[in-house]
Amino acid sequence: MKRRQIINTGAIATATAALTVGCTKSNKSSSAAASLPRVRWRMTTSWTKSLGTFRGAETIANRVKEMTGGRFTITPFAAGEIVPGLQVLDAVQAGTVECGHTASYYYIGKNSALAFATSVPFGLNGQQQNTWLYHGGGIEAINKIYADFKIINFPAGNTGTQMGGWFKREIKSVADLNGLKMRIPGLGGEVMSKLGVNVQVLPGGEIYLALDRGAIDAAEWVGPYDDEKLGLHKAAQFYYYPGWWEPGATLDVLVNLDAWNKLPKEYQAIFKTAAFEANMNMLNEYDFLNSEALSRLLAGGTKLTAYSPEIMQAAQKATLEIFAQKASDNPSFKQIYEQWQKFKAQINTWNGVNELTYNNFSMSGK
């Protein structure tokens, strides 16, 4: 046999062997995927479908379906389609649905420490919040609380630093807040209440009508993109910043623990990955969408206004008093707060060295 024939024969044999191995692996993979069960879940949410927050739920559903070849599907529902937007935790705990997309601070009436899962006044920005959750023990601490509700929780969205709300009239001092009716949830609402505000908690879909008809005088939601979608700029003219009560708000996917434990480990890993993707993507998407929406709002006549130093200082003082009181009343709040405080001091020292100095110079326009 000539040398060229030997080489060609060897190459063909090698390629045939590789193809056989590849097909065998592919068949095993397909067989393994086919052996996994078909699972159908429902996900209730706290959001209307037009909002960026709802896309966090959609991201999870889409990615889970894609990564399982359609064998594990999750159908997200808007607020009110299964249960009202502020009853997601109850529905998941009861097993009415397998999972829900929401914000944990809606449920501080059940345990005040759940505020840390979302955001607390004068707390962490979006990047810092993610660092605390994923690397600073935050997820583990929050899930100790959710275990009491037979729920496991995963971060599944972050809005970044929010805006400070829409007001029908200017608010220049703490005195101007007295008696004001405002939609604002979480510990931010408790701070505003301490400053004299008549606080109300409403789901997103009800805010515009309440503000437009005068049932409330002010309202906060997320930021320019979602606020524009809700039409809040049509009901109030003054747009305040910053949203000191939500400097980096995390949204969560809550999963009924019994339903979670029934999932194959492969599906659990895929679900976690999908939630992580939703969390990372939302923070970046909102930065892009909000920058565009703010330009449109300002062009349309919105009056962008900063909270006065007096209000900011009074709010910070009230925040620290509320933290101290809740730590005294609630052992789980105290435990998370003390751990969170140490993390915040450490990360602020680092970010003060690297990011703050850079941003101050870069944004000064020099």
Image (cartoon, grey):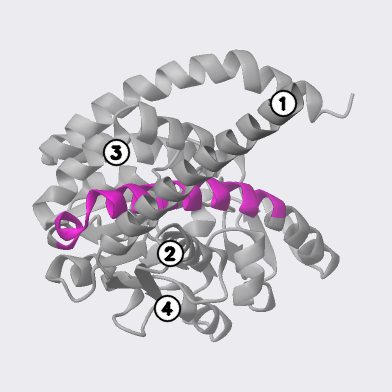
Q: Residue at x 49, y 21 (%)?
A: 348
Magenta residue span: 259-288
Q: Could you tell me if residue 169 is visible in this image?
A: no
User: Which comes sooner in the sequence, label 3 or label 4?
Assistant: 4
In the image, which is nearer the foreground, mark 1 or mark 3?
3
The residue wearing badge 4 is 78
Q: Amino acid at mark 1?
A: Asn
Q: Amino acid at mark 3?
A: Ile
In the image, which is nearer the foreground, mark 2 or mark 1?
2
- What numbered label is drawn on residue 359? 1
User: Which comes sooner in the sequence, label 2 or label 3?
Assistant: 2
User: Which comes sooner in the sequence, label 2 or label 1?
Assistant: 2
Q: Position of residue 130 (x, y in %)?
A: 45, 36
The residue wearing badge 2 is 69
Question: Within 10 angstroms of label 3, few (less than 14), some, or many (20 or more) residues?
Answer: some
The residue wearing badge 3 is 139
SS for dot 1: helix
Name above or below for residue 313 compared with residue 44: above
Q: Amino acid at mark 2?
A: Gly
